[in-house]
Image: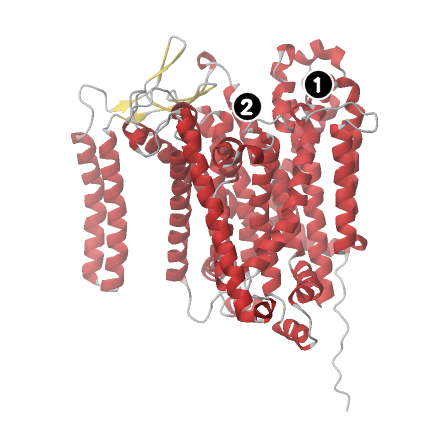
Amino acid sequence: MNNTVNAKAPPLPSFSENVRQKLFNTPVDSAITIVCAILLVWGLINAVDWIFLSSVWSAEDEPLCREAGGACWSVIDARHRIIFFGLFPYDEHWRSTAACAVMIATIIASCFSWFWTGLRLSVLWVSGFGAFYILMHGGVLGLTEVTPERWGGLALTIFIFAAVSIIGMPLSVVLALGRRSKLPIIARMVGVFIDFFRSLPLLTILFAAAVITPFVLPGWLNGDKLYRVIAGFAIFFACYQAENIRAGLQAIPSGQEEAGLTLGLRYWQRVWHIQIPQAFRNSLPAIVNQFVITFKETSIVTIVGFFEILASAAAAYGTGQWTFYYIEVYVFVGAIYFIFVFSLSRYGAYLEKRLRVGHG
Amino acid sequence: MLELFRNRKFRETFFQALAVSVVAVVLIAMVVNARNALEVQGLTAGFGFLERSTGWDFSFSVLPYSISDTYQRTLWIGLLNTLLLGFLGISLATVFGVIVGLVRTSNNYLLSLLGTVYVEIFRNIPIILQGIFWYAVLSNLPRPRQAMVLGDSIFLSGRGLYFPVLNVELSAVFVMLAIVIAWFITLAWLRNRMRRSLTFERIKLSGWIALPLLLIAIGYIARIPETALVDTPILKGLNFRGGMRIPPELSALVLAIALYGGAYIGEVMRAGLQSVPRGQIEAGFVNGLSKFQIFWYVRLPLAIRLILPSLTNQYVQLMKATTIGIAVGFSDFFMIVSTSINQGGQTLELLLILVLGFLAINLSIAYVMNTINRRIALKGYEVKD
């Protein structure tokens, strides 16, 4: 008796069959497909025409822009230094570029799983951030000093993002552990702290950090406005990230903790070797997603008066002959954000897929 | 002493007491510091300033106002502006989101590709950049003289969108709204009580006839005397007179919130539609339901129940995103509060009002959505987190 079921997968549909099913299944479907195709092609042709074919590229050709039907990239050619570097001294722009490159390399490097141990990650980020800071600030190694008031553009955006991450990440672990603490008063207090910050818009917190902390903190604790805003931002980030980590902690089977207890591990040993690695693995996609959101949210600091990339974009088209080309500038800045945010979020999606495979 | 620290109970109590006292000392120090700083500036703490008049102007208000209004009223107007912006933005975002969710779950490859392009573009660019962009576009539209016209009564120009309104007192509009809402609530209540009996049908019919008549009557009584019934905007000199104006600040923000939120809500919607168990859909198919019936009676109701918690989250996030209004000069709650702080100096009190305002808004959204969630929950079909 042969009862084995034929375990072979059904044959994959051929290409033409696939096309028929996905595009021309019913008459209505065919109509939708044709309308969509027209829309897509029309949009694509117009976009390519606006961006590449009818556009003007060099700064000297600005007078041609008025007749040209496409984008006037002259404004970018003429003003890109403002967008990227803000008020950074002209001769030192290479430092700002190098600093951004170092930081971006650090971010990319931390996407590789080889770096995913506490020690390697901290070394990577502390050295990356240190190099960034030295390059930007100067004052040592024969570099002239450039104080943070003159930082701007993309470099300031990246600086805020990196500083918030490097302060916020350890803080978020502490908050998550605090909220899950067995000591009721501590858990309650941390819970109130987290929920309070999460219920407020980020702008409110940045505003409070910029304007109000000078009132409530003694003078010697009031650093530069930039550092206060970064501290406020980092607390906000940590509160959200702590909730992600807490979700990861809660998903750990209780047997793990009990196994640790049986082996006689102390609290910090259990936390460091059992809980944290598994919590991070459980909620890695959510954690990456929080970084994505934070990168977008750095744009809000423009409202409390910093010259980051959004403010420098407004300055780029703000003068004289360039006032008509705001669309080009915003499309350009939007594209910069898109490149960062989109690649980070794609990386998050890739992680999600990979981790799901691991769990079977 | 060291002996005591070996005792776990003592250690735990000690650390908790330490934590409480540290927090208490920090808080007290902050209050004392703030009081000293205020004294140096010659300001008195307290909420007495709410009765003073502000003396400054702002860009947009749902209620009539003047610069001699009190702080209290001005803050209230700011809160209403935020609520209006949030309501318009979130409603539109939900409409966009539902459409995008449907498009992205479509079997048609090209249609879902179109949805993906939309989502990826609008989700990956900061909302504040989108708001500033739309504001730049809308406020650079042609001057009123060259405005875009629709049917000789709706005008779109760099000054904003003008459209005709009824010449009716504002309070009457609220009364009308209240009557309509009350009617719907009564109807739902009666439907539960009477189980679609003949009496219910009669009440329903007479209600539907009486409602428009009542509304027309109120509108007629409350119309502003000696004006035409409909107030149409007319071009006079360099700008329009009459009608209702939606300034470019508001439309830019609504557009930005709608497009950005639509991308997020679309993803939530898609996830909900995709996580309806296949068995449910197949059961519908076996029972001979048409494609549309399966969607309308099986897939959508189940999906809505699945997504409500994450939808609540999105709504709260979008409500918080309304604070970008200050970037384009829309006088929302945050902008009014920060202007008050700059002008009046009552920093801590105003910050408290700001925090309480947002807390109240967010908690109400969460409360309403959770109530809906509880009401429509199906027995035996609970969502498991």
- Disc number placed over residue B137 in the picture, else none: 2
Please tell me whether residue B197 is drawn above or below residue A215 in the rendered image.
below
Q: Locate residue A298: give its quadrant.
A: top right
Query: Is B180 placed left or right of B96 in the picture?
Result: left
Residue B124 seen in the figure: no
Q: Chain of mark 1?
A: A
Circle 2 sits in a helix, a strand or a loop, which is it? helix
Residue located farthest toward the front when viewing the structure as drawn? B1
Residue located farthest toward the bottom when viewing the structure as drawn? A1
Near mark 2 (Cα within 10 A), the count class, few <14, some 14-19 or many ≥20, is some
Q: Could you tell me the amino acid type at mark 1?
A: Arg
Q: Residue at x 41, y 30 (%)?
A: B38
Query: Is B211 placed left or right of A279 in the picture?
Result: left
Near mark 1 (Cα within 10 A), the count class, few <14, some 14-19 or many ≥20, is some
Residue located farthest toward the right when viewing the structure as drawn? A142
Give residue A312's position: percent from left, percent from top: 64, 23
Query: Is B177 placed left or right of A237 in the picture?
Result: left
Circle 1 sits in a helix, a strand or a loop, which is it? helix
Q: Chain of mark 2?
A: B
Q: Is B165 or B85 nearer to us in this picture?
A: B85
Give residue A102's position: percent from left, percent from top: 79, 37
Q: Is A215 or A315 nearer to us in this picture?
A: A215
Q: Residue at label 1?
A: A79
Query: Is A17 placed left or right of B183 in the picture?
Result: right
Q: Residue at x 27, y 50 (%)?
A: B184
Label 1 – label 2 distance at C-alpha: 20 Å
Tag in front: 1 or 2? 1
Q: Could you tell me the amino acid type at mark 2?
A: Val
Q: Is B258 or B70 nearer to us in this picture?
A: B70
Q: Residue at x 49, y 59 (%)?
A: B17
- The number of numbered badges drawn on the structure is 2
